[in-house]
């Protein structure tokens, strides 16, 4: 359970760190790019050397690491755009409801079973996410008025992208990740994200759309080190979990929703409505049913 706790706490830290970035007017895109560069450096330090070379590129998992890197950059930015265009609540719900995709794929690809109390837990988890992330119209401050038709596609893209990323990490760790190559796999994924992000950032620098400031770099470093270990913990948890992946991923995602909501309430004094507290309570029940439903 150490790796599960690590994944939940560190992933929640990333979400909360972006709130601090907003307070200090840190450019999120620059912080994201510097974060991935930091992840590569951190992973290389943990590994003892930079593991990506010609032989690495010939491995069966390298192409999936590159796809993971593309999803890293894309999803981070889609979360930001969705929050700005439609609202934070919609972005949060779309991101976390995606837990259903790896569950469905686990049943289809690995023959795992989701029935009885475990199925009830998955359904309850979906309801809990919606209730926990729910915001009133007053809280949304009238964002819906100016929404364009194409922008309604953003939550759908976020839902699919987040779900596929979780499913991809789970699939690769099942088939390819070993004790010997786990760091190389993670570093390759972060390297892909860093290269793509850096190219886009350099283009924006050249066009004058972005201006470098040290605080953006510092934010990237502060975010990047925990980010590397959040994925490291997730891969280790999925590898050693006592449950099937159709239970492990929802438990991890629901833990993140629960922990980040409570910390935001305690630290950032975010107001939680009765509906939000109901969602938090339901998430605890959902985690129990998903994890232990087979034994009931």
Image: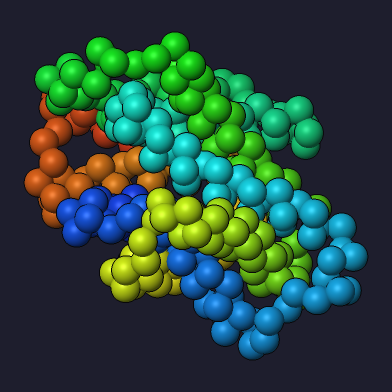
Q: Quadrant of residue 144?
A: top left
Q: What residue lies at 32% left-to-right and 33% top-to-bottom?
A: 84
Q: Tell me what residue is drawn at x 19 percent, y 59 percent.
A: 24
How many discs appear? 0
Q: Position of residue 182 (x, y in %)?
A: 69, 68
Q: Position of residue 273 (x, y in %)?
A: 13, 27
Task: Spot the residue most to the front.
Answer: 207
Q: Quadrant of residue 176?
A: bottom right
Whether residue 266 sits left or right of residue 118 in the image: it is: left
Q: Is 88 placed left or right of 107 in the picture?
A: left
Q: Where 40 sits versus 170, above or below?
A: below
Residue at 48% across, 25% down: 154
In this view, 137 is above or below 232: above
Locate residue 48, reporting x and y percent.
64, 88
Name the side, left or right, on which 127 lies relative to 262.
right
Of residues 43 and 213, which is closer to you in this image? 213
Q: Residue 92: image x %, image y %?
A: 37, 33
Q: Nearer the viewer, residue 37 or 199?
A: 199
- Give the colouring mode of the picture: rainbow
Q: Nearer the viewer, residue 193 or 110?
A: 193
Residue 189 in view: no
Q: Is residue 251 positioned above or below 189 on the image?
A: above
Judge whether residue 144 can be spotted in this image: yes
274 horizontally vs 11: left or right: left
Residue depicted at 53% across the width and 77% down the height: 42
């Amino acid at each position: 359970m150490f790796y599960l706790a690590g994944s939940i706490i560190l992933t929640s830290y990333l979400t909360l760190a972006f709130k601090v970035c907003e307070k200090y007017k840190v450019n999120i895109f620059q912080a994201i790019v510097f974060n991935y560069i930091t992840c590569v450096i951190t992973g290389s330090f943990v590994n003892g050397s930079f593991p990506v070379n010609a032989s690495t590129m010939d491995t069966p998992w390298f192409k999936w690491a590159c796809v993971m890197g593309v999803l890293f950059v894309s999803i981070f930015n889609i979360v930001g755009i969705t929050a700005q265009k439609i609202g934070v609540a919609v972005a949060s719900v779309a991101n976390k409801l995606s837990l259903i995709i790896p569950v469905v794929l686990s049943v289809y690809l690995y023959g795992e079973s989701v029935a009885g109390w475990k199925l009830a837990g998955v359904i309850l988890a979906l309801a809990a996410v919606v209730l926990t992330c729910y915001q009133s119209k007053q809280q949304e401050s009238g964002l819906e008025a100016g929404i364009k038709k194409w922008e309604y596609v953003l939550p759908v893209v976020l839902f699919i992208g987040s779900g596929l990323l979780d499913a991809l990490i789970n699939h690769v760790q099942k088939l390819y990740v070993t004790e010997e190559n786990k760091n190389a796999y993670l570093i390759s994924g972060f390297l892909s994200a860093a290269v793509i992000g850096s190219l886009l950032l350099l283009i924006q620098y050249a066009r004058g759309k972005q201006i470098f400031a040290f605080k953006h770099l510092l934010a990237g470093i502060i975010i990047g080190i925990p980010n590397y270990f959040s994925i490291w913990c997730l891969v280790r948890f999925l590898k050693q979990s006592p449950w099937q992946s159709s239970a492990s991923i929802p438990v991890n995602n629901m833990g993140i929703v629960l922990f980040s909501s409570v910390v935001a309430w305690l630290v950032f004094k975010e107001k939680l409505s009765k509906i939000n507290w109901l969602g938090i309570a339901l998430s605890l029940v959902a985690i129990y049913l998903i994890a232990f439903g087979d034994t009931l």
